[in-house]
Image (cartoon, rainbow, N blue to C red):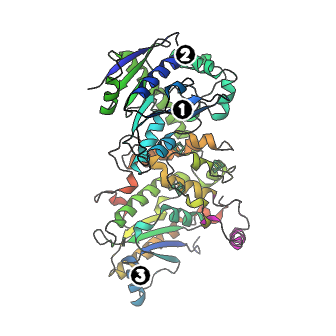
Amino acid sequence: MSDFEPTIVAFFCNWCTYTAADLAGTSRLSYPHNIRIIRVMCTGMVDPQYIIKAFLEGADGVLVSGCRPGDCHYINGNYKARRRIKLLKEILPQFGFDQQRLRLTWIGASDGIHLAEIMRTFAGQIKALGPSQTKLKMVI
Amino acid sequence: MTITARIDMREQNPLEALQQFFAGILKLEDITAILVPQRLPTKNTIMPTLVTDASFLERVDPLAPSFPMNAARIASRLTRKPMGGKVAAVLRPCEIRAFIELVKLKQARREDILLISVDCLGALQNREYSKFAEQNGTESTLRFYKNVIGGNINEMEGVEFATACKACEYPVSENADIQIGLYGMKAGESILVKSQTEAGDHILKKMNLSEINEPPSRQDAIKTLISQRTGYRDEMFVKTREASDNLDKMTAYFSSCVNCYNCRVACPVCYCKECVFVTDVFNHDPYQYLQWATRKGIIKMPTDTLFYHITRLAHMSTACVGCGQCSNACPNDIPLMELFRTIAHKTQKIFEYEAGRSLDEKPPLSEFREDEFKEVVGID
Ligand code: SF4
Ligand code: SF4
Ligand code: SF4
Ligand code: FES
């Protein structure tokens, strides 16, 4: 178990969290390399479909992160994203996915340090949960 | 002011009484056409018909236990733009609820339509219905009506209601303009007609009906029915959850799915003009399949089956009205309604939403509140 390296898919909004990730990189802060970052224009454009696909393809965790309240460049995409995450946290556990594997955070553009911390914490938690079933089994 | 009235039957025939009533509505200058289920002349099949001439209402049959499609889709086709007239639509309660969802999704308009609901006696699966109706469909409807309203359900041996109907706790529509009541009325004697909106009032006023007070037996009958249905529904939820609560069980649940997508075509509230699953996005590159297969050594073909069903749940379960047309449409008898309702019940609950309840509540995924669901944000 200890050599299990989780695969984490992260959807970061271009304006805040992605910028924070960039900042973390240029500031040489370390964060787990098993996080695959996908840049989106706003968390409001993350259709539940993307998250479902990530899980069915074997992601062990999915992190969605965007601007803080009031900072979303499309006014309220982050609030809409919160409803979708809430929705998925209701649907996915019914099929045996631990809802802890799906997380939403709001991280501002200048919060590189915070982001690196969040990613480390999340990776640690997913590691403790172990590999997702979809990774081990055939998904129809 | 609401109008409650009674229509008496001749020779215990509710179909004839309904036909007269609908003809009366169609003759009013306010109404240009009526959308109503009729038995087609060529075969024992019930389908929605759009009628402008009252002499073509002879085969009206909204009571048959036949539910070939959710006609909310048809009502949406008729109302998405002004039609140059007003249509009266005779629908089942779940069709009205689906229609209301479509209005909210801006795929239908409430303006040019008068919604008339008939108490729903329930329906059979499509395949079962043709066996049930055999040669004389009208006779079979009259027998069915008498048995259901007379409470002689057990006399209908060999007739099995669709699961969706057994679990349906909305047999009576509360938001139609005009409600036609059967439950709690004496079988073979009379039908209740009640206006529930101003538009309904306006129409009934012109019809010179004999007004009565709603008999108390009606609300009692409805209450009893709803509590039976709710009991059945809750058991169904428990069983369905048990049958789908991990990846292996989900795989078993959908193992005979051939990705035909009939279930979403039949679903009145799967709202996209073009579903992403039938676009080129899912016409994967041949090389892609090979890559997927190589990763685990095996994949099931066609691919994306669970992906489709779970995505559909995420997209539309907050609008699911439990009509059961998905199950009706599945060539391989996958119990889709059971799963969709089980999930829908939870997803609608978290947003304090009920599909089809009211035009004033926005679809949950199109709005938000600033101070809600704080628990889903953050990691510590
Ligand atoms: S499954 Fe989703 S994408 Fe397809 S029609 Fe339904 S709502 Fe639209
Ligand atoms: S998912 Fe099935 S039960 Fe729900 S509205 Fe669609 S067709 Fe009806
Ligand atoms: S109708 Fe049945 S076989 Fe077709 S896609 Fe739906 S579940 Fe699969
Ligand atoms: S732009 Fe960052 S969440 Fe909308």
Q: Residues within 10 Å of mark 3 (few under 14, many from 20)?
A: many
- For mark 1, give the secondary structure: helix
Front in this rendered view, residue B277 or A82: B277
Tell me where residue B151 appears, x and y as whole percent.
52, 16
Q: CA distance from mark 2 to mark 1?
A: 18 Å
- For mark 3, give the secondary structure: helix
Left or right: B29 as drawn, with respect to B62: left
Q: CA distance from mark 1 to mark 3?
A: 52 Å
Q: Which residue is mark 2?
A: B146
Q: Which residue is mark 1?
A: B165
Q: Which residue is mark 3?
A: A21
- In the rendered view, would you say A44 is above or below B213? below
Residue located at (45% from left, 69% from top):
A63
The part of the chain drawn in magenta is B281-304
The chain to which mark 3 is attached is: A
Q: Quadrant of residue B206?
A: top left
> Quick check: is B130 in the magenta stretch?
no
